[in-house]
Amino acid sequence: QQQVKQSPQSLIVQKGGIPIINCAYENTAFDYFPWYQQFPGKGPALLIAIRPDVSEKKEGRFTISFNKSAKQFSLHIMDSQPGDSATYFCAATLDKIIFGKGTRLHILP
Amino acid sequence: DTGVSQDPRHKITKRGQNVTFRCDPISEHNRLYWYRQTLGQGPEFLTYFQNEAQLEKSRLLSDRFSAERPKGSFSTLEIQRTEQGDSAMYLCASSLMGVSYEQYFGPGTRLTVT
């Protein structure tokens, strides 16, 4: 029973482009919606997080857009760089983290 | 370095054997979590502790799995009578209470059951 649905599974973007990853959730009790970044051989690391009463949050080149009524949220990466190539997970929290299945992002140099 | 550490990093075992993994969280964090990640999937929650109390266990955690955090510091995850389906990366994370979205993950223990 997947509570957080993520798309696309993989994404290839030219350097400088703006990759967008989308997620949808079902449980309105979730209290935070974080995004995690994972490099091969490493554990996931928190990138940015948003509360459900906020529509947008920016941290550096990363932006979360949140649509509470549609129960959807997305991650935008501005001016993407080859070093951003990683797997990105959207998630939702209620004490524990419920992760999406991940998006493998590749930024072409 | 005060990050989350896990030991061992890799474990190969034969089906039917028992294995135990250890996690050392960030020292001031009172919450500790275990997740399992298979190839191409997101981490799946297994269980979590607040100090030494185990507060929640996933339905994924069969009776062959047991976790402890005896003194509210390090934690162990034991899998008894391992099966090939147990092959996965086992991730440990820690956080402060009230900031559960900000979890710090260890590098994981990769288990291969042959």
Image (cartoon, coloured by chain):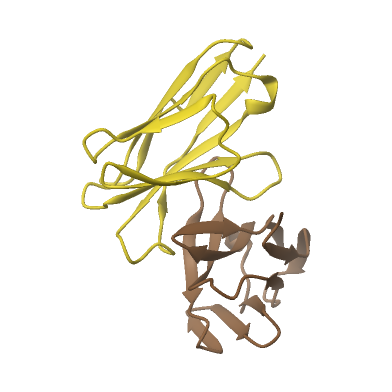
- Give left or right: position of B47 versus B27: right
Instruction: Give how far across and how far down residue A60 sits, in percent.
Output: 48, 79
Location of residue B5 (image quadrant): top left
Q: Is residue A15 above or below residue B37?
A: below
Q: Could you tell me which quadrant the C terminus of chain B lies in?
A: top right
Please tell me which residue is depicted at 60% across the width and 10% down the height of the picture. Answer: B16
Please tell me which residue is depicted at 59% across the width and 44% down the height of the picture. Answer: A40
> In this structure image, what is the colour of chain A?
brown
Total marks in image: 0
Instruction: Give how far across and how far down residue B32 sits, in percent.
Output: 36, 46
Q: Could you tell me which quadrant the N terminus of chain B lies in?
A: top left
Please tell me which residue is depicted at 62% across the width and 70% down the height of the picture. Answer: A27
Instruction: Give how far across and how far down residue A37 sits, in percent.
Output: 55, 58
Please tell me which residue is depicted at 57% across the width and 80% down the height of the picture. Answer: A64
Instruction: Give how far across and how far down residue B57 sits, in percent.
Output: 49, 43
The residue nearer to you, when weighing A5 against A48, is: A5
Q: Is residue B47 above or below residue A33?
A: above
Chain yellow in the figure, letter: B
Location of residue A86 (image quadrant): bottom right
- Give left or right: position of B26 versus A71: left
Location of residue B4 (image quadrant): top left
- Give left or right: position of B64 versus A73: left
Res. A109 visible in picture: no
- Give left or right: position of B16 versus A22: left
Res. B23 visible in picture: yes
Q: Is residue B47 above or below residue A48?
A: above
